[in-house]
Amino acid sequence: MQALFKTDESWAGLILRVALGGVIFAHGAQKLLGWYGGFGFEGTMGFFTQKMGLPWLVAFLVIIGESIGSLGLIAGLLTRFTAASFIVIMLGAIVTVHLPQGFFMNWFGQQQGEGFEYHLLVIAMSLALLVVGGGKWSLDGLIAKWLGEPAKSQSSEARDQKYAFRTL
């Protein structure tokens, strides 16, 4: 349990999780609520299951992961789990839809669809969150404290690393 919730008090985790959560939430809100020109839950489920041929459970998990998972990420709740799920979702999107379009997004409308550069950025940000955790002001940090693992400051981590190096 500790490995899932432990984090430090870094600003990097906070900045990454709020930025990534905010961007992914917009996509999730399209899929779940029909906001921002999206098709809503029924439309997205229909597209994923009927047109793309995805199992209903996969379609459901993508919709919930992007919408509710992104809100949890913003709050710093289950940061590592949500980051890992975003990696899986983005890899799935690359393989099933975006790989044939190439790397670049369709800036000038000359491609059949969008490339996968956005997805790689989401994967990179998610990988960073897997490493550092939720950072400053995360619910994960509070849970870790409650479980008995106090969040470390960056300076105490650096001191611990110097001590460990000296003892080698």
Image (cartoon, rainbow, N blue to C red):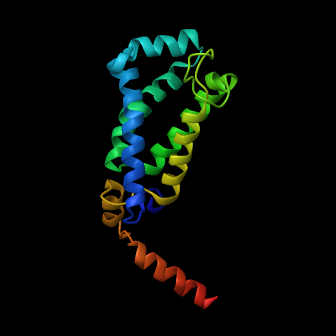
Give the residue drawn at x 66%, y 28%.
Answer: 95
Q: Where residue 164 sits in the image (x, y, percent)?
A: 56, 84
The residue under the point 44% across, 57% down is: 133
Image quadrant for the C terminus?
Answer: bottom right
Task: Reply above or below: 84 against 63.
Answer: below
Residue 55 rendering spot, x and y as whole percentages? 56, 19
In the figure, 147 relative to 42: above or below?
below
> Residue 129 appears at what percent x and percent y?
48, 53
Q: Is residue 163 left or right of residue 44?
A: right
Q: Residue at x 51, y 19 (%)?
A: 56
Q: Nearer the viewer, residue 5 or 23?
A: 23
Residue 143, visible in the rendered structure: yes
The spot of residue 27 in percent (x, y) is: 41, 27
- The reply to whether residue 78 is in sight is no
**Front-most of residues 55 and 39:** 39
Judged from this view, the residue extending furthest toward the bottom is: 167
Q: Is residue 118 above or below residue 144?
A: above
- Which quarter of the image is occupied by the N terminus? bottom left
Q: Is residue 5 left or right of residue 106?
A: left
Quadrant hosting residue 113:
top right
Vertical placement of residue 93 versus 69, above or below: above
Q: Is residue 107 left or right of residue 65?
A: right
Query: In which quadrant of the rendered view does residue 51 lie?
Result: top right
